[in-house]
Amino acid sequence: MQTLTKKIFRLSPPGGLFDETAVRNLFPGRSEAARKVLVHRACSAGEIIRLKPGLFLLAPEFRKTHPHPFVIAALLHSPSHISLESALAHHGLIPEAVYEIASVTSARSRSFTTPVGVFSFTRVPAVNPQAGVRAQNINGRSWAFIASPVRAIAE
């Protein structure tokens, strides 16, 4: 097991998600280049998964809990909230399976294809971007901003 993986495993972040700030705090005496080498070695060994630059996920065999896709979406691109088909499926209003986590943002549109799923962020300009959006508890441990059914349909 790589040095970085050992320390992150002991830290036990929720869902196994962590960012470069956690790496910086775990190795304060090392240079930025040395920390990048630690991350690169752990990624090459398959012990951590790079979701985007600066955002990482422990490999499944090193996680104590599994991250919810809505939590990953919130960390991939902010400000954003779960909406469109993903919110409608979450509220039980559509019978189809949703294979892509769709979010709405006031920033630029982006899409991320990661080993844990596909995440799309669509720019929707709004006067009040948080109207009809609530923070909801996801599986008892995590929170995510999710659009109400009316807001998800309107977007």
Image: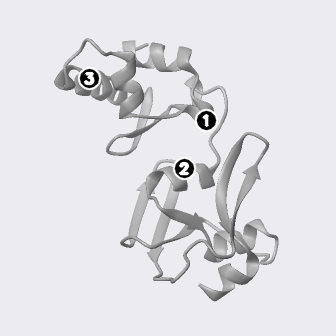
Residue at image coords 49%, 50%:
75
Dot 2 alpha-carbon crowd within 10 angstroms: few under 14, some 14 to 19, many 20 or more: many
At numbered mark 1, what does the secondary structure look like: helix, strand or loop? helix
Q: How many marks?
A: 3
Dot 1 alpha-carbon crowd within 10 angstroms: few under 14, some 14 to 19, many 20 or more: some
Residue at image coords 62%, 42%:
67
Camera-nearest residue between 50 and 44 = 50
Residue type at numbered disc 3: Arg
Apparent side of residue 27 relative to residue 89 in the rendered image (left or right): left
Residue type at numbered disc 1: Gly
Apparent side of residue 40 relative to residue 48 in the rendered image (left or right): left
Vertical relation: 141 (above or below) 154: above
At numbered mark 2, what does the secondary structure look like: helix, strand or loop? helix
Q: Is there CB contact under 8 Å for labels 1 and 2?
A: yes
Please state the horizontal and vertical placement of residue 131, each as a whole percent of the image: 64, 76
Residue that numbered label 2 is attached to: 72
Vertical relation: 81 (above or below) 51: below
Residue that numbered label 1 is attached to: 15
Residue at image coords 41%, 60%:
112
Residue that numbered label 3 is attached to: 35
